Image (cartoon, rainbow, N blue to C red):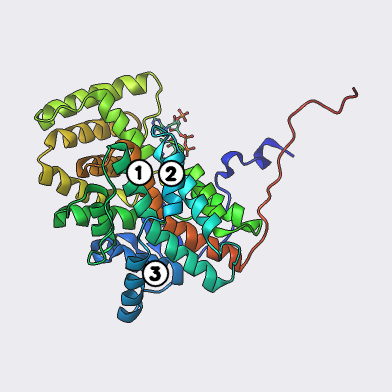
Amino acid sequence: MTDTDVHKGLAGIVADRTAVSKVNPDTNSLLYRGYPVQQLAAGLSVEAVALLLWSGELPSTQELAEFEEFERSHRGLDPKVREAVDLLPADCHPMDVGRTAVSVMGANDPHAQTSDPAAELQKAKKLFAAFPAVLAYDQRRRRGQDPVAPRDDLDYAQNVLWMTFGEEAAAEVVNAFRVSMVLYAEHSFNASTFTARVVTSTLSDLHSAVTAAIGALKGPLHGGANEAVMHTFAEIGIRPGETREEAAARSREWMENALAEKRKVMGFGHRVYKRGDSRVPTMKESLDAMVEHYGRHELMGLYEGLESAMDEATGIKPNLDYPAGPTYHLMGFDTEMFTPLFIASRIMGWTAHIMEQRADNTLIRPLSEYSGPDERSL
Ligand code: COA
């Protein structure tokens, strides 16, 4: 085996076919089941996007209404999940809470081990509906607040914000949140989705695959980047009231130093997109709306300063986590909750891939080139 036969990080390797989404780095485009994600984000509900990803087609009015009713009736926090979460240290990472919660949901689901297509779809729908209560509960317990029960007169996006903050969010905020959920929902064979497919390929169950995927998503080279972006902003210093120009000048200087020190700056770069992430312009519009809504122009200054300094020095463009991080910050989520929000959305994509993998399964088991000592005797 030669060095060129070893594909570290599986870079450039096509591991299987998928009909769930298409990422085209040449045209900076992302299609969910054939539809450009920008068009979906422009007006579709999160619930409709979930059905599209699972079934391959947009739902009829009746199908959507039936699913909305199902989703609204499965939103409550399961007491067994709450008990398990309460046993975790109050200062553990919220991704540990999310990972544990999904594992507990699996252990308590009487159909966890049933994997025919109807059972898998039912489990995916239940997980999609139930997960937001976990992150809302966790956000509130960290703030010493009592949980807020879901409301069945609100749609998915409105209800997540309601359960987290205990008040109805303004329409602009709901819209920015909905857009983020649509954009985060699916992205072909990224690390966590591939993890979910690897676990499924052993004929393990859906909750195990999602639990493993959450572990992969936690890392800062993947989903954890959205919170890392806010840590960067915090390191530079967030100064409400500062002008956009002043903030931009400070963040440009920070970036120049970071690059001189050869630091990796989270929220920039992508394994597949090398000329910009197709989802960024849409998410940036939502961030712009939130900056206006909350009157926090200094955050946009920090954003633009880092972006322009990185572009001028390296040509490396922001990825979706870059505008998503400050958007969630402005909405009032704690930084550590950003990646659990990514879970809530990516459950749609993971479960679509789990079902696709199961429908035409081959065990995923690559080879490795041995680089240890030659055979020797004791
Ligand atoms: N900050 C600084 N430099 C970066 C960079 C970043 N965010 N992303 C890439 N680079 C540089 C690397 O240092 C490397 O430079 P070199 O050739 O001089 O060594 C070059 O660009 C190629 O980067 P590499 O990490 O090998 O590319 P990759 O395709 O393996 O990496 C990521 C993709 C996403 C892992 C990488 O861009 C990264 O770590 N980004 C930050 C984490 C992040 O935002 N993740 C979310 C992804 S959606």
Question: In the rendered structure, are the residues bearing label 3 and label 2 in contact, judged by CB atoms less than 8 Å apart?
Answer: no
Task: Report crowding for label 3: few under 14, some 14 to 19, many 20 or more residues within 10 A (C-alpha).
Answer: some
* Residue corresponding to mark 2: 85
| Residue 222 position in % (x across, y down) | 44, 41
Q: Nearer the viewer, residue 63 or 148?
A: 148
Residue denoted by label 3: 52
- Name the side, left or right, on which 234 lies relative to 369: left
Depth check, mark 3 against mark 2: the one in front is 2
Disc 1 residue type (three-letter): Asp
First in sequence, mark 3 or 1: give its number: 3
Residue 74 or residue 264, whichever sits in front: 74
Between the C-alphas of marks 1 and 2, the distance is: 8 Å
Q: CA distance from mark 3 to mark 2?
A: 32 Å
Residue 176 lies, in percent from the top left, at 22, 53
Q: Which residue is mark 1?
A: 138
Depth check, front residue: 182 or 1: 182
Mark 3 or 1: the one toward you: 1
Residue 121, horizontal then vertical, whole percent: 49, 69
N-term mark: 3 or 2: 3
Residue 28 visible within the image: no
Secondary structure at badge 1 equals: helix
| Residue type for callout 3 | Leu
Give the residue at x 24% y 65%. 43
Asked whether the viewer can see residue 123, the reply is yes
Q: Is residue 122 above or below residue 198?
A: below
- Quadrant where the N terminus sits is top right
